[in-house]
Image (spheres, rainbow, N blue to C red):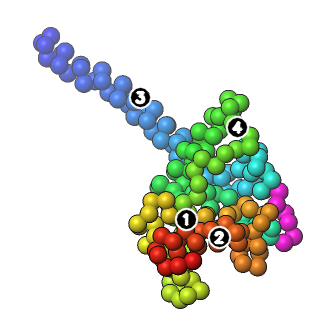
Amino acid sequence: MTKHSQSTDQPKSKRPLLFKIAIILGGLLVLGTAGGVTAMTLENRDSFCASCHAEPEYTYFQRESSITPVDLATFHTTKKTNCIDCHSGNGIVPGRINSMMLGARDLVSWIGGHAPQPAPLNTPIGDENCLKCHQNIAAARNMNNHFHVFLAQWQAKDPNAAQCVSCHQGHNNSTSDKTIAFLDQQATTAVCQRCHTFSGQGN
């Protein structure tokens, strides 16, 4: 009788513990989901980004109120594009999740008083961020678009090849020319020369 009662009591004693663990895990899941949704909602507001990323981001945010675009980023705001649209990869995973992880790290630095100002750009915008909206950029296979058409081939052969942001610098308002899609002509010409030198196709 004693042995029998002990064997039936053991599973019963474990049930409350398992129930508590399930409640805790469920609560953490709900909190994590709610926190993620809240973070994504806040990230969609440029003012939220500028509240912690003081400089130079606050200057960039202030430019959004310009009557006419003064750089590529402010031009994008006329198309209802937010900071996070360019500063995150494709999709929720890994795009927005990676951005939130970087944001969480920055938040810890900001709260701890260790956030450097002006903030350095440690993670340059990758081509995949631009291609979310400009995926058909190489579709027109003609001379006027040859630099976009051949960029992928250059990148496949040279790990240090140019990226979209090598020519299209979003926040450059000092030398970018709005008549040529806010390109910095000198910087872009240098990229052109590097590509032509690499391919052996003249200057």
Tag 1 residue: 163
Q: Nearer the viewer, mark 1 or mark 2?
A: 2
Alpha carbon of mark 4 to alpha carbon of mark 1: how far?
26 Å
Looking at the image, which is closer to me, 191 or 142? 191
Tag 3 residue: 20
Looking at the image, which is closer to me, 41 or 97? 97
- If you read the primary sequence from the N terminus, does the residue marked by circle 1 or circle 2 appear first? 1
Q: Nearer the viewer, mark 3 or mark 2?
A: 2
* Amino acid beneath label 4: Pro
Tag 4 residue: 116
Residue 130 appears in which quarter of the rendering?
A: bottom right
- What is the residue that sits farthest to the right in this orientation? 67
- Residue 61 lies left or right of residue 37; in this view the side is right
Alpha carbon of mark 1 to alpha carbon of mark 2: how far?
11 Å
- If you read the primary sequence from the N terminus, does the residue marked by circle 3 or circle 1 appear first? 3
- If you read the primary sequence from the N terminus, does the residue marked by circle 4 or circle 1 appear first? 4
Alpha carbon of mark 3 to alpha carbon of mark 1: how far?
51 Å
The reply to whether the C-beta atoms of the residues labelled 3 and 4 are less than 8 Å apart is no
- If you read the primary sequence from the N terminus, does the residue marked by circle 4 or circle 2 appear first? 4
**Per the image, is 66 magenta?**
yes
Q: Secondary structure at mark 3?
A: helix
Rendered image: mark on residue 23: none
- Residue 36 lies left or right of residue 67; in this view the side is left
Tag 2 residue: 188
At 72% from the left and 78% from the top, the residue drawn is 180
**Per the image, is 90 magenta?**
no
Q: Secondary structure at mark 1?
A: loop
At 49% from the left and 37% from the top, the residue drawn is 28
* Amino acid beneath label 3: Lys
Tag 3: Cα neighbours inside 10 Å, few (<14), some, or many (≥20)?
few
